[in-house]
């Protein structure tokens, strides 16, 4: 049975929904203290039924839901995976999520799938190819989607565009919006040596439909240096909160997601992070 269609995402903090917190969300809703919205990876719900759907249907009847896809592989040579896209379309018909997003990446070949969101070059050819792939996704889903800026560990040689300009051109050509992951900006800036504030200041706020913040790890790279790892396994860093506030002062409030995908904490810790995001929103909206 399909859940009640979700309204638009409120410009407040949401949380990434994990199975260990299903009951917590419903209990918090009964107390009037539920998160403003939740985000799920739709690939976790591609099965036809069972407990995951019973929980998600119950939650989606109460709070808005966003789908953050991790498997379309839009940047692959053959474009978005048709089986993944069909499954996502069916799930969207079932739950009517308030938002759907995926990544500026590729993760499959005709014979293999990879458990990573692999980067694409920022060339004119890649822009043409990726914009066409986004168009195929939007046509199949019958809706505009958001594309997330990646966390990067290496940069391609001979790019035709810088990352911000590439994202702007992609949005113009395909009609998609931008999911601005501020933690990814910070990770990429650390690894590639650019200034995160300058990158962020180049983004057109009108394109941004959702924002992600998360924690990351910094480790030895084995060669005498250090590398930032986008592991979503710790509280949001103070530097990431500062970048968020900087962008919101210029852009105004947006839906903000607390991402926490590894070493998932207790409910109270997760909700404390969401409360901090709401406090940042209140300051910039004052």
Image (cartoon, grey):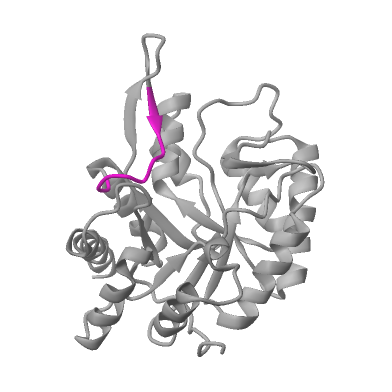
Q: Quadrant of residue 135?
A: bottom right
Q: Is residue 264 left or right of residue 276?
A: right
The residue sitting at 44% across, 45% down in the picture is 200
- In terms of depth relative to the viewer, which is nearer, 30 or 148? 30
> With respect to residue 213, does 19 lie above or below?
below
Left or right placement of residue 41 versus residue 31 in this view: right
Q: Main secondary structure of the magenta part?
A: loop
Point 80% across, 38% down: residue? 125
User: In which quadrant of the rendered image does the C terminus lie?
Assistant: bottom left
Question: Which residue sits at x=53%, y=42%?
Answer: 150
Q: Which residues are magenta?
A: 227-236
Q: Quadrant of residue 257?
A: bottom left
Where's residue 190, x and y in %?
40, 28
Q: Nearer the viewer, residue 273 or 149?
A: 273
How many numbered dots are placed on residues in this image? 0
Q: Quadrant of the N terminus?
A: bottom right
Residue 251 lies left or right of residue 116; in this view the side is: left
């Amino acid at each position: 049975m399909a859940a009640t269609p979700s309204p638009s995402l409120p410009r407040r903090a949401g949380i990434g929904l994990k199975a260990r917190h299903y009951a917590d969300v419903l209990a918090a809703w009964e107390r009037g203290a539920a998160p403003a919205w939740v985000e799920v990876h739709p690939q976790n719900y591609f099965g036809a039924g069972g407990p995951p759907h019973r929980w998600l249907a119950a939650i989606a009847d109460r709070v808005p839901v966003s789908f953050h896809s991790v498997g379309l592989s839009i940047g692959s040579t053959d474009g978005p995976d048709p089986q993944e896209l069909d499954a996502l379309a069916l799930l969207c018909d079932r739950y009517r999520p308030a938002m759907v997003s995926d990544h500026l990446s590729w993760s499959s070949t005709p014979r293999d799938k990879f458990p990573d969101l692999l980067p694409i070059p920022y060339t004119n050819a890649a822009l043409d190819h990726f914009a066409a792939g986004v168009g195929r996704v939007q046509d199949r889903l019958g809706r505009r989607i958001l594309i997330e800026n990646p966390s990067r560990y290496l940069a391609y040689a001979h790019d035709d565009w810088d990352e911000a300009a590439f994202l702007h051109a992609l949005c113009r050509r395909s009609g998609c919006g931008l999911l601005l992951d501020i933690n990814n900006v910070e990770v990429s800036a650390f690894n590639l040596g650019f200034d995160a504030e300058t990158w962020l200041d180049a983004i057109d706020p009108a394109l941004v439909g959702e924002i992600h913040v998360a924690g990351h790890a910094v480790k030895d790279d084995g060669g005498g240096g250090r590398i930032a790892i986008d592991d979503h396994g710790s509280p949001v860093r103070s530097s990431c909160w500062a970048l968020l506030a900087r962008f919101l002062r210029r852009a105004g409030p947006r839906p903000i997601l607390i991402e926490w995908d590894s070493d998932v904490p207790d409910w109270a810790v997760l909700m404390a992070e969401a409360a901090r995001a709401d406090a940042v929103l209140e300051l910039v909206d004052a």
